[in-house]
Image: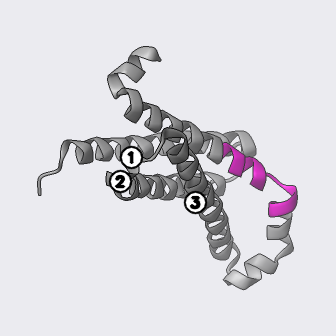
Amino acid sequence: MNLTLEQKRKLKNAKTLILLGLFLSPVYALFADGFKSITPYANALVIAILLSLVISFFEFILFTGKAKKIKFYQLLFLRIALYTGSVFSVVTLTMIVSRMFRYNLNFQEVLNSNEFKNYIYEQDYLTGIFYTLALVGLVVFTLQMQRKIGPKVLLALI
């Protein structure tokens, strides 16, 4: 199967997204928890891989063809909305599944546990979400600018 030039570019971007996610995700775990446990690092890596795959899917499948004719700011807001929903979903589900395995509980038991409620309402859940959203927003904006002005021009500007 021969890939078009655009498909090759998007695959390259997908690889870059995954590598960036794998590099940047442990940074948050390091600052949030230090070296107390391996669990935050494992969760961060799972979140990074899943989000990189979701974003790559959106970029490779959804934002091709007719999506190129959508105005820049509309496409940017559409991406931000989709990725925000994806971030909340992936982070929340990863944390639930992690607790299911760690504490040998089922889905409902995790949701009803005081430890999970404490994590959501009083600990660093929102901080992690905002960190992830900031990284995703930066990546999405960079991809948009790269598409608009070209990768070589963007690199020269940076």
Residue linked to disc 3: 86
**The stretch drawn in magenta includes residue 124:** yes
Q: Secondary structure at mark 2?
A: helix
Crowding at dot 2, Cα within 10 Å, few <14 / some 14-19 / many 20+, comes out as few
* Marks 2, 3: nearer the viewer: 2
Residue underneath mark 2: 66
Residue at image mark 1? 69
Q: Secondary structure at mark 1?
A: helix
Residue shown at the point (31%, 53%) measured from the top left: 65
Label 3 crowding class (10 Å Cα cut-off): few <14, some 14-19, many 20+? some
Q: Is residue 75 left or right of residue 105?
A: left
Depth check: give the residue in front, 68 or 48: 68
- Residue 72 spot, x, y in % from top left: 49, 39
Position of 73 compared to 145: left or right?
right
Chosen colour scheme: one colour
Q: Reading the chain from its start, which is encountered first: label 2 or label 3?
A: 2
At label 3, which amino acid type do we have? Ser
Q: Residue at x 58, y 41 (%)?
A: 137
Under mark 1, the amino acid is Lys
